[in-house]
Structures are given as C-alpha cells and as structure tokens.
Image: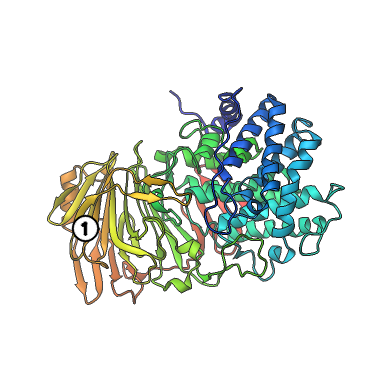
Amino acid sequence: MKRQTPEAILAGFEKRVDAMFRAESGNPLVRAKKQKPLGPERGNYVRAYSYSIMAFAARCLYLGEMLDEANAALIENAQHYLDNPRDINDRDSFHWHAEIVMRLIEMYGTNGTEHPGRITKETEALALKPVWLYAKMCSWLSKAEVKDSQTWHIYGSENHHAMDFTVNWHFSKLARNLSEYRNLKFDDGATAEDHYRAWNEYFIAYCRERARKSLCIEMMSDGYNATLIRGFYNFYDFGDPPVQRSAGMFLDLYFAYWAEEQIGGHMGGGGARRKGEKAFYQNRDHGNAPLAWFYFAIGKQPTVNGHDVNAALSAYRPPTVVADIARDVKGRGRYEVRQRTQGLGRQGHSFPMVAVASKTPNQLRTDGGGILRYSFCDPAFILGTPMTEARPMSDWVAISAQNRWQGVIFAGEDDARIVPLVRPEDNKVVLNAQWSVQSKGSLITQKLKYHKGGAEMNVWISEKGLSAPVEKDGVVFVEAEGAWAAIRVSDGGFTWKDGSYTVKAEDGSTRKTPPGRIMALKGEYAPVILEVMAKSDLDSFDTFKAKVKGCEMSMDGAILRYTTIYSDLLTFDTSFEKTPTINGKPVNYAPKKVFESPFLNADYNSGIVTISKGKRKKVLEF
C-alpha cells in the first residue's frame, strides 16, 4: 500500500473525528461515579463525572441528536456545582472541564458559531453560573501580570495553572458581553473587561516565553502535557487574532516537540511527573494518544472523552512538516535532541487551589541552567534523560523534580522499555531522585543523596517486547526487535526481583505495574550504566556483547571513567561534586539553543523557532 502523504493524513482529521462521534451515536448518558473528597476540607472528587457529562453533551451537539438530553445533562452538571460550592474550588474537579462548557456555548449556544440554538438560552445561563463563581474567586489582575513574573510564576502545578488561566480568560471573554455579568466585580474589584484584556496580554506573553526559554516544566509528561494544552484550543478558536496566532504557534511547537521523540505514539526522552506505574508504560487511551489519532492516524480510534473534546472540535491542525516528523520514523534517521528546560526556583504554596491570593506561587528562575534534556533517537529506539546538576531539593520547584524519568523505549507494539529509576518509598512520588550523563546510546546514572522520598535504585526491564535478561560476568543483556541493550552496575552488584508491584492512586484505587523484571542495586549510590545500540550497527548479538565487555571502566578516586560502545569517554563524579564530562567537556546545562535537533531549533531567548524536515519548513516568530 502506498504511504499516505502528510497532507493526506492531516486531511483525514474530520473523517476520523466524525467516526469517533458516530461510533457512539444514540448511546444514552452513562455517568461516571461521583467520588468522595480526596482529603480533609476538600470538595467531592467529581472530575470523571463532569467529563462523562461533557463527552455526552459534545457528541449529541456535534451530531445534532438527543438535544433535550444534552441540555439536561449540562444543566445537571452545573446544578451539581451550585449545590456543592466547595467542589468549584477543588483542584481536581471543576477547572478540569469548565473550559469545555464555554467551548460548547461558543459553538452551539444562542450565538453559536456552528449550530446556534442547540444549547438553549436557559441552559447557557445556568451553565455559566458556577463558572462565574470560580472566576470571581480565582481570577485577579495581579495573577495575570507579566512584567515581574514574565509568566514564570506558576500557581499550583503547570497544568493546573494553565487550566486556571484558560477558564479565567474564557469566562471574562463571554461575561464582558453579557448583561448579567458585564458590570459585576470580580473579587479583586475589577470587571470582566479588565480581566479579559489582562489575560489576553498574559497568554501572548506565556506562549512567547515558552518558545524563548523552554516549553514544559513538567517535561515530556504524557498526561500532564496533554492537559496543559487542552484549553489552548479555545484561545485558538475563539481568541482575537494576536491570541489566536500565539495559540496556533504554541500548538505547532508542542506537536513538533512531541513528534520528534516518539515512535508510533510511544513517547521517549527525559521527562518529569511520570508517577507510580506511569513510569513503566504509556496509556494508549488517554493523554496524547487521542491527539496522535486525530492528527496523525497513529494508534487506534479513541472513545469520546471529555478531556479531548476541545481538540476534536477545534479548527486547529498541525503543519504538514510536523505530520511528516510524527509519521516518518524511519525517514527521521538517527539524531540527537538537546533542550534547555526550566526547573530551578523557589517553591511556592501549591494548594488549596488558586483562589487563595495570599499564597505565594511557584517562582521559576530563568537566569541560569539546571537541566539539559538529551535524547538519542534511532528508528529502533529512543534513549533519553534529563541531565541535571547535583543540587539540593531546595533549589528546585517540585513540579520539575517530581518523578524525573529516564530510560529507553524500543520500536514495536509492546511498549518495551528499560527504566533505571529510584523507586519511590510509597511507590508513587519521589523528588530529585537521580542525576545522569548521556552521550548517544550510552547513559550513566546514580541515585542522588539530595533525594526526597527515594528507596533503592532499580533498573526495570519490561517483559513484553524484550527477550529474557541474560547475565554474563555481571552484565545484563536483553534483545529488542531492532536493538540490543546492556546494563551494568559499577559497584556492589544487584538482586533480581519481580517487576510488578502495586501503586495506590490519589482516588484510593490500586494499580499494578506491567510485568517485568527488576535489577535492585545492593549499593545505594552505585552508578548504573545502560548501553543501547541498533541492530543495523552490528552483525550479531554476540558482537554487541563483546563490544560492551570491551568497554574500559575505572575509578579515579570518586570519579568513574567509562569508555562507551560509541567510543565516547564519560566521567562521572560519584561524590556529586564535579560536573560530568563527555570527551573532556563538562555538560553544559545552559546551552545557547533552547531547542536543538535536525527538526526543531531555536536560540535561547530568541522566540524564533524553526521546524523542518527535508523540503518542508515552518518558522514560528513568537
């Protein structure tokens, strides 16, 4: 079968979205269960309930069916929050779906851009009432200032902060033209018009700063990043031209960022906030997976989910160059990715939610380095790590230091991966757990003495997609579909453990990690060396094994010196004092480029981003 062009793939967006909605045509509303509060003094945990309402209403409104039921569902959802006002200000419920309500009103309300009147005037009026209660508390002009913060003051975590300002912007946009809200004062004394102007300016600055200084603090985190961008579709579809332009460029940058470090939708590269079992697999039903299907026909057709309604109904489409990068894994060849990432700063008060104006936000500092995201990408695998300075936890903002991820993903259908990580004591959250150095397909990593909540250093090896681990002279070898890997512990050895353990989620449910095998290190701070090479580079597994065995390793005091299978000399200070070196050069945690690869490039602080592949090219001028 002839391979479809990127243009043809993108042109199929409407057909794929339509098929998703029509697959559920005529189905009645199935409400997700309302759950009890996740902690004392909290509102009910009703995020899933509201998502189920939004999914049902969006499908009915899109298809023009069961409109009475859709209106009744939107009224029911709004009434729940009016009857349970504490739920409006709970960080895990209301602002996760409120921007979808406003999108549906924009498209199907009394002045809708698509099918006006499918949402009745009465439904529209009631649906906006809890949004007003949220915005009047949670939106204040000083939160939207840009002169001092440069948008790097983050209320809560990065994804919560973005959801919050999306809701605040969108409500002020609607309210300034509605007689019942136009002259009302928010809790800071300002009007909807005042807030709308401030949030417009803020959003443009926010997008510009991410292009200049780094895209995501919660770097390459599937669920959190997909949630971060969710409301940006509303800025694109309903914002004034400068806002729409900024939103479109941000989304272009985001999908280029995602595309170059994934194989078949399976995300690789150094990350953060991959909590619990999410370090060991990627959910192919949520996160970026539905977006990969909508835009690039990667993966499988999703079910209708409230989380993804904005993308499904938006006019935004990625540029063809991004579709080409996403789909043509083989054609991308072999390359390195280097990205500067923010994470240093002053920890603020994260919760209770953003309505507490007296609480200090997280304050990111952008005057130095701290993190170099590095990935080595081959059609057969992607190995990546966030190379960080060995700093105490007090230097980092927690959303950057939480559950940093490193490891290798392999091409294939089985989500095969090798993950060297410090296990969280509670099997869920650990902060500032390890540091590393990587060049090409060779990684050295070590547990940090500055960690918070860390147990033993583990190397997790998936059962699916990889051969059974074979140990020879202290080195563990595994084989993937298109690559080989070797793992060695520099000192003290390891013990084998079953790779499945139980993780308790925030809602009280328990989940198991996928089947696998664990190398549990005996030495708490013993470095781990991971070597990965594509089969296209060598003639046999035995040749790979011999090459690994021939790598020279020695200790010079506390300094580990290691020559990799790619003939690079790495030094790694196991006492945490000196910066690691690659071929004699210390790792540069503050490179001149914020994005650097064959496909995505930008100088630090320039705001001019180039996305390119072959003859295709797009320049984003933030």
Count of marks placed on residues: 1
Using the image as rendered, state which of residue 48 and residue 461 is in the foreground: 48
- Picture quadrant of residue 455: bottom left
Residue at horizontal 75%, vertical 60%?
A: 198
39 left or right, relative to 453: right
Q: Quadrant of the C terminus?
A: bottom right
For label 1, count other residues whose C-alpha is less than 10 Å away and answer few (under 14), some (14-19) or many (20+): many
Residue at mark 1: 488
In the rendered image, the residue lying farthest to the left is: 473
349 left or right, relative to 283: right
Residue at horizontal 34%, vertical 75%?
A: 578
- Residue 183 percent across, percent down from the top left: 86, 55
Query: For the residue marked with disc 1, what is the amino acid?
Result: Arg
- Residue 91 percent across, percent down from the top left: 59, 55
- Does residue 242 appear in this view? no
554 left or right, relative to 77: left
Q: Secondary structure at mark 1?
A: strand
- Residue 432 percent across, percent down from the top left: 41, 66
- Residue 488 percent across, percent down from the top left: 21, 58
Using the image as rendered, state which of residue 331 and residue 147 is in the foreground: 147
Residue at horizontal 50%, vertical 67%?
A: 397
Using the image as rendered, state which of residue 88 and residue 516 is in the foreground: 88
Q: Quadrant of the N terminus?
A: top left
Figure coloring: rainbow
- Does residue 442 appear in this view? yes
